[in-house]
Image: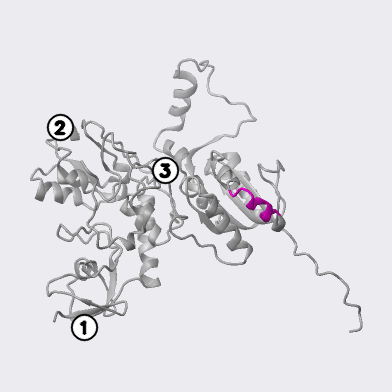
């Protein structure tokens, strides 16, 4: 009761955010960076864990995970599961994470036919055979959106989602609101 | 004075014989729909326009308005069901908006925006539906077909050509077929000037060489949401 009231208010702990691009083109990450100088404001509130922006290779416990891209190979599935295990909130970002997107347009073709077409039939690609180095992750038979494998908390559609949609999602989540996107921010193209 | 019914608590005037959908459109009130078109008889198949009239579910495009009727339209309960129907449409076809010429002018997409559909929710089917690019002026991309059958009706009743038909069974087998010996559009008398060439609410029937004349971002539903464009005549792609 008589303790001196001199201690400064503890700064709110920064939220940890991880991001990754699975079977995506990094276009969503580029659009995210289009929030421009708002990223400085964001960095006052969050700290990046695993992300192409930090080059950290594995994520620890995080508050938020942003997943760009769908699942086209075994490594994508491992990374997605690592994110789901570590992130309190997981967001599917962009068309590919949400419905497979452009990579999923191979889904009506046979995987072996595609590999043979590219690596054995196609002129000038060396005809060296289908790569099978053990370092290479095995392709999945079909490309899948991420909600088919893990629980996804929120979705941010768009190809890519506009920077303002990223900003709206992040500011809503940081303020403890359910993220909503109005006309102009919610689009699939 | 014309009789009225209540739509979400608002009085809507109607002329006897009008459906709930027709009266709502005349009053400028949006009821989500995909297979209904003001120029054609109601098909009643997409079920997006389901409302609750005096407590019972029914398709507003086929249900006649009655004086004093109380109709629920944009309630959370109905919009939730509509969103689920949309999600089923999206997983049953191959709806890749970023690579679709119709994006921004598409009724399916605009309706999904209106109902805040954030994901397909269900597992995708990724059906194999080859395109028909045989016709010199029109591309058919069946990946996006929602079986509204507007092209069937327009070709049969307006163009008197009967180019299109619904056929096949099952979720992946049922699709629009072309009435020609070869099954190809080039082997019909279909023309770009046909009504059926401009009736598709999604990106199946596309005039060639016009795809991006209006850029993405400046299209009909980029400018305003679908619920604000109820009274305007449907702008079909100019030939």
Q: CA distance from mark 2 to mark 1?
A: 53 Å
Horizontal arrangement in the rendering, residue B53 relative to residue A14 (left or right): left
Chain that bears disc 1: B
Tell me which residue sits at (57%, 34%) in the image.
Answer: A138
Res. A174 mark? none
Res. B68 mark? 1
Q: On the image, which quarter does residue A75 sit in?
A: top right
Chain that bears disc 2: B
Q: CA distance from mark 3 to mark 1?
A: 45 Å
The residue identified by callout 3 is: B98
Taken as a whole, is the magenta stretch helix, strand or loop?
helix
- Of labels 2 and 3, the one closer to you: 3
Q: How is the image coloured?
A: one colour
- Whether marks 2 and 3 lie on the same chain: yes
- Whether marks 3 and 1 lie on the same chain: yes
The residue identified by callout 2 is: B187
Asked if the residues shown at circle 3 and circle 1 are in contact, with their CB atoms under 8 angstroms apart, the answer is: no
Q: Secondary structure at mark 2?
A: helix
Q: Secondary structure at mark 3?
A: helix
Asked if the residues shown at circle 2 and circle 3 are in contact, with their CB atoms under 8 angstroms apart, the answer is: no
């Amino acid at each position: 009761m008589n303790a001196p009231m001199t201690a400064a208010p503890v700064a709110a702990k920064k939220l940890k955010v991880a991001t990754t691009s699975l079977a995506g083109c990094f276009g969503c990450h580029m659009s995210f960076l289009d929030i421009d100088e708002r990223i400085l404001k964001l960095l006052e509130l969050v700290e990046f864990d695993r992300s192409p922006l930090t080059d950290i290779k594995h994520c620890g416990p995080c508050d938020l995970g942003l997943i760009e891209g769908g699942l086209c190979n075994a490594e994508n599935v491992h990374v997605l599961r690592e994110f789901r295990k570590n992130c309190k909130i997981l967001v599917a970002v962009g068309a590919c994470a949400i419905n497979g997107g452009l990579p999923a347009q191979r889904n009506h073709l046979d995987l072996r036919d595609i590999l043979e077409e590219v690596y054995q039939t196609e002129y000038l690609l060396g005809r060296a055979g289908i790569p099978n180095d053990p370092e290479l992750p095995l392709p999945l038979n079909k490309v899948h959106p991420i909600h088919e494998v893990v629980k996804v908390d929120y979705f941010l559609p768009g190809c890519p989602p506009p920077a303002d949609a990223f900003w709206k999602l992040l500011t809503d989540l940081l303020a403890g609101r359910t993220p909503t996107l109005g006309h102009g921010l919610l689009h699939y193209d | 004075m014309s009789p009225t019914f209540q739509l979400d608590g608002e009085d809507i005037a109607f002329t006897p014989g009008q459906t709930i959908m027709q009266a709502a459109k005349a009053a400028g009130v949006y009821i989500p729909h995909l297979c209904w078109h003001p120029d054609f008889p109601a098909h009643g198949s997409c079920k997006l326009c389901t409302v609750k009239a005096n407590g019972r579910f029914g398709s507003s495009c086929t249900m006649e308005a009655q004086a004093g009727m109380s109709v629920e339209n944009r309630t959370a309960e109905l919009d939730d069901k509509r969103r689920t129907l949309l999600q089923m449409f999206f997983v049953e076809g191959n709806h890749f908006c970023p690579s679709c010429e119709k994006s921004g002018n598409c009724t399916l997409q605009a309706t999904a925006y209106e109902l805040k559909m954030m994901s397909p929710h269900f597992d995708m089917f990724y059906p194999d539906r080859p395109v028909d690019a045989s016709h010199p002026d029109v591309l058919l991309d069946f990946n996006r077909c929602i079986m509204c059958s507007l092209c069937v009706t327009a070709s049969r009743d307006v163009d008197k050509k009967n180019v299109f038909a619904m056929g096949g069974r099952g979720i992946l087998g049922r699709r629009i077929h072309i009435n020609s010996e070869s099954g190809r559009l080039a082997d019909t008398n279909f023309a770009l000037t046909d009504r059926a060439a401009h009736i598709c609410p999604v990106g199946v029937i596309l005039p060639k060489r016009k795809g991006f004349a209006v850029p993405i971002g400046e299209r009909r539903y980029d400018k305003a949401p679908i619920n604000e464009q109820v009274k305007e005549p449907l702008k079909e792609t100019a030939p």
